[in-house]
C-alpha cells in the first residue's frame, strides 16, 4: 500500500489546519467555524499527499504544543489529584485534591472544549479527504488517523463527563451546537465501529522511524481499552492479544527506557512541538521535575500509594525520586526525568504494551480464565523485579492484585487510576481510606458553567 511520505511535525505547524486557539475559547459557541488566519484553506490542505499528511500531523502538534492543556499534562495532574496519586502544592489544584469540584473549578472548561475542538478538526479532516482527489490509499490512511484521534478524545470526554454530545460531522453547525448528550451505549458503539473502520484502513507499519503517528496496532490498543471499559471481555482479550503478539513491542527490562522516544514498549507517543519553552521533552517532565536537582518538586505521592509498593519493586526505585523535607522523606513522580534538554530524548507515551497485558489480564479474569490472568499479571510483576503470583489464588484475590498492578504500573498516566476506581466501583472504599471527607457525590466531574452556556441542551453531570 502506498503511504504518505513522513514529514517532521516541527516543520509543518502551519498545516494544523483546524487548530483552535487553546487559551481563549469562546463561551458563545460550542463549535467554531472559522480557522485562524495562519492556517491554509481546506482545499489547499488536501490538494496533494504531502500537504494532506502534514495537515493530519498538525492535529497531533496542536494537542501537545502548550503546557497544562488537555493532552499535554493537564489530564495527568488533575486526575491524579482526584485519585490517590499526586498531592500537588499548587493551590489551583486544591479543588481536585480535596475532591470538591464545582462548575466554576479551574481547568474544567479545557477538559471539555479542547477535546471537542480536536473532534471537530478530525471531522473536518475526514470530510476534506472525502471531497479531495487524493488516491484511495492516502485517503484511507489519513481518514483512519482522524478517526483514531476522534475516538481518543471521545473516550476521555465520556469517562470524564458521562453526558456528552456525539458530533460526527461539520455540515450543520447550528444543529451540532444544539445537540443534547448521547447515551453511554451510543458513544461506545460509535467508538467501537469507528476504531474498527480505522483498523481496516490504516497500515500496520508506522510512518517514519518513530511512533508519533498511529498505526494499526495503536488503533487496536485503543480498541482493546474501549472493549474493556464496555465489559466486552472476549473482544478485549482478543484485541489486546493482537498487540501483545506483535514482535515490534516488548516490555523494556530497563525501566528507565520505557518513556524514551526510542522505547520498544511504546505503541503511540506524542512529540512535544512546543511554541513557548525551549528544550521541553514532555510537559509532564517540565511540570514535575524541579529546575534544580536538589530542589523539591511541587508534586508528591500520597502516603497511601507509597505503602502499596512491595520491597524490591523496581518501579519505586526507577519511577519515583525521593527528597527530604526536614526529617521527612517524600517521593515525587519520576517516569519522565527531563525538565528541559536538547536533543530531545523523551516523548509523551500515550499507549504502551504494559497496559495491554493488564487489559488482557482483566478480560481473562472476567471470563474465569484465572491461570491466564495470573500469567499476564506476572509479566508486569516480574519486569518490576517482584515474585510471581501463585496460580492457587482465588478470583477475588486476583482482582485485588490486578487493581494494585494497574495502580503502580500506570501511576500518573492519563488518568488511568481515577477511571479504574470509578468504573470498578472501587473509588468510594479506596479514596475514603486515603482522603478525608470523600463521599459518593465526589465521583462525578461537573461540566464547567461556561460550557453549559454554549448549548441549552447540554445537561450537567448529576
Image (spheres, rainbow, N blue to C red):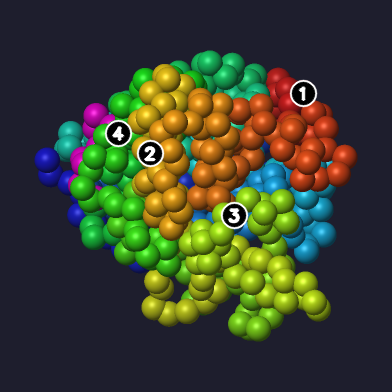
Q: Secondary structure at mark 1?
A: loop
Determine whether 266 is above or below 257 in the image. Answer: above
Q: Please provide the residue range marked out in magenta.
A: 199-206
Q: Name the residue at the left extreme.
A: 1
**Within-10-Å neighbours for mark 3: few <14, some 14–19, many 20+:** some
Q: Earlier in the sequence, mark 4 or mark 1?
A: 4
Q: Cα distance, mark 4 to mark 1?
A: 37 Å
Mark earlier in primary sequence (2, 1): 2
- Report how far apart the C-alphas of labels 2 and 3 lie in the structure: 19 Å
Badge 2 marks a residue whose secondary structure is helix
Q: Quadrant of residue 346?
A: bottom left
Mark 2 or mark 3: whose residue is earlier in sequence: 3
Q: CA distance from mark 3 to mark 1?
A: 35 Å
In the picture of the structure, the residue carrying the numbered disc 1 is 462
Please give the name of the residue rendered at 55% of the width and 31% of the height, measured from the top-left corner: 397
Would you say the residues marked 2 and 3 are in contact, meaning their CB atoms lie under 8 Å apart? no
Q: Residues within 10 Å of mark 4 (few under 14, many from 20)?
A: some
Residue at 35% from the left image edge and 60% from the top image edge? 253
Between the C-alphas of marks 4 and 2, the distance is 11 Å
Task: Name the residue beneath numbered marker 4.
Answer: 241
Between 29 and 185, the one nearer to me in the picture: 185
Instruction: Return the residue at label 3.
Output: 309
The residue pinned by badge 2 equals: 376
Amino acid at each position: 500500500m502506498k503511504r504518505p511520505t513522513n514529514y517532521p511535525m516541527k516543520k509543518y505547524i502551519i498545516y494544523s489546519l483546524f487548530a483552535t486557539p487553546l487559551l481563549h475559547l469562546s463561551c458563545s459557541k460550542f463549535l467554531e467555524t472559522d480557522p485562524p488566519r495562519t492556517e491554509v484553506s481546506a482545499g489547499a490542505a488536501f490538494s496533494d499527499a504531502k500537504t494532506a499528511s502534514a495537515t493530519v500531523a498538525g492535529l497531533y502538534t496542536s494537542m501537545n504544543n502548550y503546557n497544562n492543556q488537555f493532552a499535554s499534562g493537564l489530564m495527568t495532574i488533575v486526575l491524579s489529584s482526584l485519585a490517590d496519586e499526586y498531592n500537588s502544592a499548587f493551590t489551583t489544584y486544591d479543588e481536585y485534591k480535596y475532591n470538591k469540584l464545582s462548575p466554576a473549578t479551574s481547568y474544567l472548561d479545557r477538559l471539555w472544549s479542547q477535546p471537542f475542538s480536536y473532534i471537530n478538526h478530525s471531522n473536518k479532516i475526514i470530510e476534506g479527504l472525502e471531497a479531495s482527489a487524493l488516491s484511495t490509499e492516502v485517503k484511507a490512511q489519513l481518514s483512519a488517523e482522524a478517526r483514531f484521534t476522534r475516538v481518543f478524545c471521545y473516550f476521555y470526554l465520556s469517562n470524564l463527563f458521562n453526558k456528552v454530545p456525539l458530533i460526527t460531522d461539520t455540515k450543520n453547525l447550528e444543529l451540532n451546537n444544539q445537540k443534547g448528550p448521547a447515551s453511554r451505549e451510543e458513544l461506545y458503539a460509535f467508538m467501537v465501529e469507528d476504531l474498527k473502520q480505522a483498523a481496516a484502513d490504516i497500515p500496520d507499519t508506522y510512518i517514519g522511524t518513530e511512533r508519533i503517528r498511529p498505526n494499526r496496532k495503536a488503533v487496536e490498543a485503543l480498541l482493546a481499552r474501549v472493549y474493556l471499559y464496555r465489559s466486552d471481555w472476549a473482544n478485549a482479550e482478543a484485541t489486546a492479544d493482537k498487540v501483545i503478539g506483535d514482535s515490534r513491542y516488548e516490555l523494556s527490562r530497563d525501566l528507565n527506557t520505557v518513556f524514551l522516544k526510542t522505547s520498544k514498549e511504546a505503541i503511540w507517543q506524542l512529540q512535544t512541538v512546543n511554541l513557548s519553552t525551549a528544550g521541553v521533552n514532555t510537559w509532564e517532565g517540565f511540570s514535575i521535575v524541579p529546575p534544580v536537582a536538589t530542589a523539591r518538586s511541587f508534586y508528591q505521592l500520597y502516603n497511601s500509594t507509597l505503602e502499596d509498593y512491595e520491597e524490591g519493586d523496581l518501579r519505586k526505585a526507577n519511577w519515583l525520586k525521593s527528597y527530604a523535607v526536614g526529617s521527612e522523606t517524600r517521593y515525587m513522580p519520576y517516569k519522565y526525568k527531563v525538565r528541559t534538554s536538547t536533543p530531545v530524548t523523551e516523548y509523551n507515551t500515550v499507549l504502551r504494551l504494559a497496559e495491554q497485558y493488564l487489559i488482557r489480564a482483566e478480560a481473562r479474569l472476567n471470563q474465569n480464565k484465572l491461570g491466564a490472568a495470573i500469567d499476564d499479571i506476572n509479566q508486569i510483576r516480574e519486569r518490576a523485579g517482584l515474585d510471581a503470583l501463585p496460580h492457587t489464588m482465588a478470583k477475588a484475590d486476583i482482582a485485588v492484585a490486578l487493581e494494585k498492578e494497574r495502580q503502580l504500573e500506570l501511576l500518573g498516566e492519563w488518568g488511568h487510576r481515577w477511571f479504574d476506581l470509578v468504573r470498578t466501583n472501587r473509588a468510594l472504599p479506596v479514596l475514603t481510606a486515603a482522603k478525608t471527607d470523600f463521599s459518593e457525590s465526589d465521583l462525578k466531574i461537573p461540566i464547567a458553567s461556561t460550557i453549559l452556556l454554549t448549548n441549552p441542551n447540554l445537561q450537567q453531570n448529576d
